Every structure is written in structure tokens, then in C-alpha cells.
Image: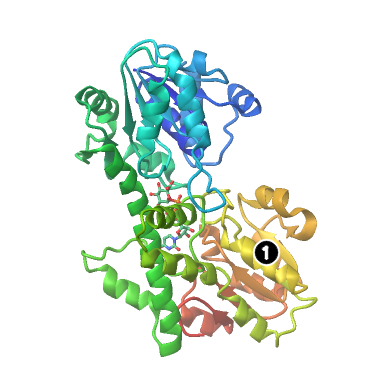
């Protein structure tokens, strides 16, 4: 099948590349000329495990192409994915200007029946707006389908290729048939394609992300309470996660969720509620709790240094909002760095992927190190923010010789309490005893 993907951000590029891998001819369209040229030259603009291999193979085999021209990109395409940004506007609602602009442009360009697919996370009702924008100038029949994506950064290719489910919002049989054909190679193991109307599909995406953000936040609050009552959140997680009604995943307490999705989507859903005169109380709490959680370890850092942080050097392990990505959007590390710099600290940071992004944002206010140990040289304390696997089993002896004080503030609960005690560390973590 010939497919066009408009927008080559994270979602668009993964979607385009993976659909070329299943044998389709995909053209990715983006107005960013530098990015298109970069991809034409064989450079993948984002870091995502497994993506490069697929990208190169399909480019070489002629199934994956790039252009800045919408006209050229949609030539012959039976389906057109819209994977455009929906940044939060000033009031927290998703800004649809990019999607609606492309929808306006598409109308007069369609030459035969085409399915236009909203892949971006968009507020309920957007597919109707897209439909109306296209219909203004369309001369041929078309359908607009809502097909939200559920892929996680860092495992996006795997999530795309083996989805738990595919949600398709459309009431058109013609569109359903085409979508079923397109997704058939990805649901061979029996995972369902769930059909529903457009509005419900749009709502499903927000409900999924808001639920997961709430699940994490609930555990973060349990963790905060565990610290006060003398319990261990790891045990609570095991104790409740084995109940299949609760489930094991997304129960890890830590220093808050970040990224480009949860914060934005929770905010946008709260906004949608407000616009419909409904007060979604849980979401307000989730946002408030998460805000505090991100800098949760700082009071302990201050206390450890007797409220005198000026001149202290803090090593930070992990800058990305989670492992296997270079994405620093809403990353807890940034909030901690900002507060520590303000308090007069020197920051020595290490992250396997995200350092260039932080450098672009904060410049030389942070010292970037070649490896985790370099960050510890002459440091007064270590703060762990992202659970990259390489931080899980460090050389503690080497760490001892580098750190000025044997103290670790761990926002991701990487180490066992007993091990830290044995090694003689003062160890602060989340939801466990010091
Ligand atoms: C999230 C969803 O998981 C995807 O299904 C969805 O498609 C995507 O948003 C999106 O809307 O595009 P993502 O933001 O890539 O994916 O990252 P997650 O793996 O979900 O992690 C989000 C945040 O939650 C991270 O900051 C992570 O550290 C935190 N988290 C996750 C926890 O604090 N505890 C956990 O147990 C799990």
C-alpha cells in the first residue's frame, strides 16, 4: 500500500519506518527542510533503539522516502497519517494549528478516495474539525479516522510492531477495511483491533495516559507515606502488583513522571473537563503531586548539608526523563539542576544520551562528564535521577574513592537498603527508610 506520513517527529518517523518494514511504500513529509535533508543523507534525527536498522534497510530497499512537498508526498497514497505536534497552548489545551493547517491544504489535493488518519494525541472532537477542514475544498470522497498511538519512547519500535491493541475510531466500513489490511501484519498474534467511533478513540488515548500517570502518582503518594510510617514501598509494590486486578506494571515510585506525553495529556484532559463544566478532581491532584515529587529529594539534600549548599558539588546520574531516550522534556533532572544551581551548587552530570540536549538548553552552567565516575570526582554527593541500567551495578569501591562523602540520593530506588548499609553509605531513596 502507498502511505504518506505528514510530520516526522517521534511518532511520525516510527510510524512511517515501521509501516515500510511491513512492506508498504511510505513517504514522510515534513516542512523542516534541514530534517528532511538529514534523513535523505541517511541520518536518523531521533534516538530510538532499533529504529536505525529498520530505517536504513527500508531506505535502501526504496520503501521509505522523504520530502518537504505535501503534493509530492501524498501522490498515490491510499492513507495519509497526520502525526503533527499538538503543543499545549497557554491555557493547557492542545493547540491544533498544525493539524488544521495540513487538513486545509489537503482538501484540494486529494485525487481519489483517501483515508486521513489522526495519529497525534488530539482532544475529543478533533477528527470532526479535520473532516470539516478537508471537506471545504475536497472533490473526492474521504474518511477521517482517529488512530491514537500507544508507543513508549525507548521501546517505540517494539510497541509499534507488537501492539497490545490497535484502536481505530471510525464508523466507515470502507475505512475499517483499509485499516484492517494495514494493521494485519502487526496483530497476527491475536492482539485486537478495537473499532469505535472517532470521539471514543480520541478519548481512549487521554484516558490511557491519564490512568497511567495516576497509577504512578498513587504509588508516589504511597511511597511518601511509607517513609513516614516506616514501611517499604518495594514490598507494597510486590504485595499489590501480584493482584491481577492491579497489575505489576507502572507501580514504580520515583521522583515523578516526565516526558512529552503524560504531563501534556493530563493537563489537556483536565482542560477538556473544565470546558465541559466537569471538575476532574483526580487529575488536579495528579498534577500537583507530580510537581512536588520531582524535587522530593531536595529537602533531604539540604538537611544533609545543614542547609548550606553554596559551594557544594553535586554529581547527577541521569538527565533524560527515563532510560533509553535522549528526551529531556519535563525531565525531573532539570528541576533539580535548576534548584541546586540557584542554591550555589556546582553540577557535574552524566547521561549516556541526553547530555547534548541539556547542554543546548543550559549551556555551561552544568559540567558534562565522559562517564559516571568522572561526575563523582570531588563531588560532595550523588543524586540519581534516571534509571539507566549502567547505574544499577556500579563499582562501589571506585565510587568511595571519588566521592567526598558516602551519600547517595536515589530518585529511582536502584539499590537494596541492606547493600547500602553494608557498604556504609548514607542512602536516601523513595518510599523506603534511610
Ligand atoms: C507514554 C505512554 O506509556 C505510551 O503508551 C504513550 O503512547 C506515550 O506516553 C504517548 O502518549 O506518546 P512515554 O512518555 O514514552 O509513554 O514514557 P513511559 O514509559 O510511559 O514513562 C513516562 C514517565 O513515567 C517516565 O518519566 C517514567 O520514569 C515514569 N514512570 C513510569 C514511573 O515513574 N514509574 C513507573 O512505574 C513507570
Location of residue 373 in the rendering, given as x and y in whole percent from the top left corner: 67, 64
Location of residue 38 with respect to 345 vertically, above or below = above
In the rendered image, the quadrant that contains the N terminus is: top left
Q: With 55 as the anchor, is 180 left or right in this view? A: left
The quadrant in which residue 68 appears is top right
- 67 or 54, which is in the foreground? 67
Location of residue 133 in the rendering, given as x and y in whole percent from the top left corner: 42, 26
Where's ligand 1: which quadrant? bottom left
- 36 or 82, which is in the foreground? 82
Q: What colour scheme does the image use?
A: rainbow
- 259 or 60, which is in the foreground? 259
Please tell me which residue is depicted at 33% across the width and 61% down the height of the picture.
Answer: 249
User: Circle 1 sits on which residue?
Assistant: 373
Q: With 393 as the anchor, is 303 left or right in this view? A: right
Residue 251 visible to an observer of this rendering: no
Residue 408 visible to an observer of this rendering: yes
Location of residue 404 with respect to 173 vertically, above or below = below
Location of residue 316 with respect to 259 vertically, above or below = below
- 429 or 120, which is in the foreground? 120
Location of residue 303 in the rendering, given as x and y in whole percent from the top left corner: 65, 86
Number of disc labels: 1
Please tell me which residue is depicted at 27% across the width and 44% down the height of the picture.
Answer: 200
Location of residue 142 in the rendering, given as x and y in whole percent from the top left corner: 32, 20
Amino acid at each position: 500500500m502507498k502511505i504518506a506520513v505528514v510530520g516526522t517527529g517521534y511518532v511520525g518517523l516510527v510510524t512511517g519506518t515501521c509501516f515500510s518494514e511491513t512492506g508498504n511504500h511510505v513517504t514522510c513529509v515534513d516542512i523542516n527542510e534541514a530534517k528532511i535533508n538529514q534523513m535523505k543523507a541517511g541520518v536518523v534525527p531521533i534516538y530510538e533503539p532499533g529504529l536505525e536498522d529498520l530505517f536504513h534497510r527500508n531506505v535502501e530497499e526504496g520503501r521509505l522516502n522523504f520530502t518537504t512537498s505535501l503534493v509530492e508526498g501524498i501522490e498515490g497514497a491510499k492513507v495519509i497519517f497526520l502525526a503533527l505536534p499538538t503543543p499545549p497552548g497557554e491555557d493547557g489545551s492542545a493547540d491544533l494549528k498544525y493539524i488544521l493547517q495540513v487538513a486545509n491544504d489537503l482538501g484540494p489535493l486529494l485525487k481519489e478516495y483517501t483515508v486521513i488518519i489522526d495519529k497525534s494525541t488530539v482532544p475529543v472532537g478533533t477528527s470532526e474539525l479535520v473532516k470539516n477542514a478537508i471537506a471545504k475544498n475536497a472533490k473526492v470522497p474521504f474518511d477521517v479516522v482517529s488512530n491514537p498511538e500507544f508507543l513508549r519512547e525507548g521501546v517505540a519500535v517494539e510497541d509499534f510492531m507488537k501492539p497490545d491493541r490497535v484502536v481505530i475510531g471510525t464508523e466507515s466500513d470502507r475505512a475499517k477495511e483499509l485499516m484492517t489490511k494495514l494493521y494485519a501484519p502487526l496483530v497476527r498474534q491475536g492482539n485486537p483491533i478495537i473499532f469505535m467511533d472517532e470521539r471514543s478513540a480520541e478519548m481512549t488515548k487521554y484516558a490511557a495516559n491519564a490512568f497511567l500517570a495516576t497509577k504512578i502518582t498513587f504509588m508516589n503518594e504511597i511511597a511518601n507515606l511509607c517513609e513516614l510510617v516506616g514501611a517499604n514501598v518495594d514490598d507494597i509494590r510486590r504485595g499489590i502488583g501480584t493482584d491481577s486486578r492491579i497489575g505489576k506494571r507502572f507501580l514504580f515510585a520515583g521522583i515523578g513522571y516526565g516526558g512529552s506525553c503524560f504531563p501534556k495529556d493530563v493537563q489537556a484532559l483536565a482542560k477538556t473537563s473544565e470546558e465541559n463544566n466537569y471538575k476532574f478532581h483526580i487529575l488536579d491532584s495528579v498534577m500537583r503531586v507530580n510537581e512536588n515529587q520531582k524535587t522530593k529529594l531536595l529537602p533531604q539534600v539540604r538537611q544533609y548539608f545543614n542547609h548550606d549548599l553554596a559551594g557544594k558539588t553535586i554529581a547527577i546520574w541521569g538527565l533524560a526523563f527515563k532510560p533509553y531516550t535522549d528526551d529531556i522534556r519535563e525531565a525531573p533532572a532539570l528541576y533539580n539542576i535548576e534548584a541546586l544551581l540557584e542554591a550555589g551548587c556546582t553540577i557535574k552530570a552524566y547521561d549516556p544520551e541526553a547530555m547534548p540536549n541539556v547542554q543546548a538548553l543550559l549551556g555551561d552552567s552544568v559540567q558534562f562528564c565522559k562517564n559516571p565516575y568522572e561526575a563523582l570526582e570531588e563531588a560532595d554527593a550523588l543524586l540519581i535521577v534516571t534509571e539507566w541500567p549502567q547505574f544499577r551495578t556500579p563499582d562501589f569501591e571506585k565510587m568511595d574513592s571519588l566521592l567526598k562523602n558516602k551519600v547517595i540520593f536515589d530518585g529511582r530506588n536502584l539499590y537494596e537498603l541492606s547493600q547500602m548499609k553494608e557498604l556504609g553509605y548514607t542512602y536516601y531513596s523513595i518510599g523506603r527508610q534511610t
